Image (cartoon, helix red, strand yellow):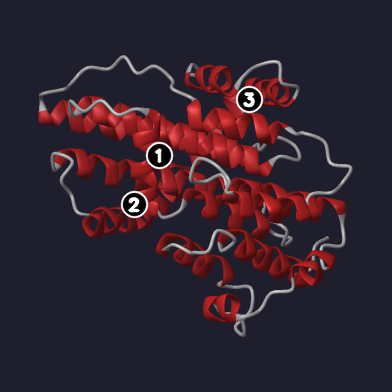
Amino acid sequence: MSTHREVLAGVRILVCVARADGHLTGEERAALEGAVQGLSEATSVDELLASDIDFELELAQLLSDDSRRQVYEAALVLANSDGEASPQELAVLERLQSPTAEPTLLGQVLGETRDTFLPTHLGTIHDPGLRTAEVQEDTLKYAIFCAGLGAMPIPGAAVVTDLLVVALQAKMVRDIGCYWGHDLDAKAARSLIGTMAGSIGLRIAVSNVARLIPGWGSALAAATAFGSTVAIGRAADAWFASGAELSVEELRKSYAAGVAEGKQAYAEKKAAVEAAHARNEATMAELNARLARREITQEQFLAALEALP
């Protein structure tokens, strides 16, 4: 069982990674602010950023192999969130990684998440009513898929689950764009998600460090994945409706409103989410196992997931 001190040490290590290349973006700061909420009233982002963090001291606070592995995987995602880790970030990762560590599924999925380009064969929908109905239907479908992944993460690979959720959300954004007559590739879709919701890599990283705290269960992960997917769908629809001219501020306001809508939608659709999870649980468990054994790629995993009833 991880301690509060281990979680705080994990967050401080993420700060070391985030500022290793000499700067910290506004999105990274916002994500850190969300991470420290609830850790301790005496802890603030300003204190973390102003402090002279002793990396080795913080590393020594990670008492178990599991907590060290989880913080390392979170840091790896963070370092690669902009496409490629800098030499400075790699140097920090090398100090964090156990000398006996072996390549894991994370490295494979991390690379594929940046490159995955699931085909989207959808046409423009000119009728406003039909388009709205299709966007709402797709958003709910993807929200249920993402909630299912949250409820059944790949054993020992929570970061991988979050990366798969992001890949599904990017596919949803591309689908919504097609309905509006816009053709986005996977990279542009992920960039749009990052603009509306903040640094994807850091959000994944801090959420997985927070999972070290007992009580972060599958139900919470499912609700969070569902709600964020609804919020992203709402904001993406508003952005395409504006002719892709919505300002960053307006886009983020739409996403924030969608977060509240997503929480309410999950409460209303919880029975449907649980029914879909029960219906597809065995198939998803097998897909998870095959991905973990590297028998299928992330692209094959996501394509099979989309084919579920």
User: Is 263 rendered above or below residue 110?
Assistant: below
- Residue 273 is at least partly visible in this image: no
Instruction: Name the residue beneath numbered marker 3.
Output: 284
Write the residue at 32% across / 29% down: 174
Residue 94 rendering spot, x and y as whole percentages: 75, 50
Q: Secondary structure at mark 3?
A: helix
The N terminus: image quadrant: bottom right
Kindly identify the amino acid type of the residue bearing the numbered disc 1: Arg
User: Is 250 rendered above or below residue 164?
Assistant: below
Say whether disc 1 or disc 2 marks the residue closer to the N-terminus. 1
Instruction: Name the residue beneath numbered marker 1.
Output: 190
Disc 1: CA contacts within 10 A as few (<14), some (14-19) or many (>=20): many
Q: How many marks?
A: 3
**Mark sitting on residue 196:** 2
Kindly identify the amino acid type of the residue bearing the numbered disc 2: Met
Q: Residue furthest bottom?
A: 42
Write the residue at 24% across / 60% down: 249
Say whether disc 3 or disc 2 marks the residue closer to the N-terminus. 2
Q: CA distance from mark 3 to mark 1?
A: 24 Å
Residue 213 rendering spot, x and y as whole percentages: 72, 62
- In this orientation, which residue lies closer to the viewer: 73 or 91? 91
Residue 182 rendering spot, x and y as whole percentages: 21, 28
Write the residue at 71% across / 15% down: 295
Q: Secondary structure at mark 2?
A: helix
- Residue 227 is at least partly visible in this image: yes
Q: Is residue 298 left or right of residue 193?
A: right
Kindly identify the amino acid type of the residue bearing the numbered disc 3: Met
Disc 3: CA contacts within 10 A as few (<14), some (14-19) or many (>=20): many
Q: Is residue 270 left or right of residue 61?
A: left
